[in-house]
Amino acid sequence: MSAFAHETRSRTERYTGPIFSVFTDEVTMSGGGTAHRDVVVNKNAVGVVALDEVGRVVLIKQYRHPVGEKLWELPAGLRDVAGEDLVVTAGRELAEEADITARRFDLLVDLHTSPGFSAETIRIFLARELTPVPEEERHARKDEEADIEICWVDLDEAVAMVLRGEITNAAAVGGLLSAARARDDGWATLRPAGASPLR
C-alpha cells in the first residue's frame, strides 16, 4: 500500500489572538478529493516534573476556565519568548510557578496535546537537584496563578492519582507516567535536554 501525501491546498485565517490562531485548511484526503479541517496553532509549551531527593514531585493546582475547575498540573508554560532555549523556559516556569530552581534537566517526553485539531506540542523535562527560590526573589503571581496551590507528592502516589482520575491534565499524565517509568529503568531511557524538539 503506497503512502498518500496529504497536502494543504489553501488556508483561511479565522481568528488570531495573543495565545493562538485558528485556520481552516483545505487538505487532500487519502480516499481522493479534499476536506476542510480547522486547525489551532499556538506557541507550544514546556512542562517540568521536578523530583526531589526523596522521590517527591511538585504538583500545582490552578483554575482552568475552559473546564471550569481547578486541575492538578505540572509547572508549565508557553514558549512565548522568541529564541529562548527550552531548558531556560522550563527553568523560568518552574521558578515562577513552584518557587524552585534545578541544576539538572533531562528530557522525559514530547507530546502532541490534541492532534485532532491542534498543532500544539509540549516538551516535558525532568528536573533534579532542586533548591528553593529565596522568598525575596520569588515571582509575584497574578490572574489564575495568584492562588496556585503547591503540593509535594511521592511520585508513586502521583501516578496513583493519575490512575484514580484525580490528575487529568494531559501533560501531567504523560510527564508523571514517563518519570515513573524512567525511574524504574534507572534513568537509562532519559534523553538529553537539548534534543531537537517537535516542530
Image (spheres, rainbow, N blue to C red):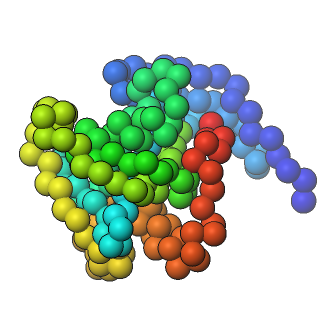
Quarter containing the N terminus:
bottom right
Q: Can residue 52 be seen in this view?
A: yes
Across and down, in percent, residue 117 comes to 49, 43
Q: Is residue 136 above or below residue 172?
A: above
Quarter containing the C terminus:
top right
Across and down, in percent, residue 38 comes to 50, 35
- In front of the other: 146 or 63: 146
- In front of the other: 71 or 140: 140
Residue drawn at the location 42% of the way across and 35% of the way down: 89
Q: In this view, does 165 lie above or below 39?
A: below
Residue drawn at the location 28% of the way across and 48% of the way down: 100
- In front of the other: 174 or 127: 127
Q: In which quarter of the image is residue 34?
A: top right
View extreme (right): residue: 2
Across and down, in percent, residue 170 comes to 40, 58
The reply, left or right, for residue 23 in relation to residue 133 is right
Residue drawn at the location 34% of the way across and 54% of the way down: 130
Across and down, in percent, residue 104 comes to 47, 51
Q: How many marks?
A: 0
Q: Quadrant of residue 97?
A: top left
The reply, left or right, for residue 91 in relation to residue 34 is left
- In front of the other: 85 or 109: 85
Residue drawn at the location 26% of the way across and 59% of the way down: 59
The reply, left or right, for residue 67 in relation to residue 43 is left
View extreme (left): residue: 147
Q: Can residue 158 be seen in this view?
A: no
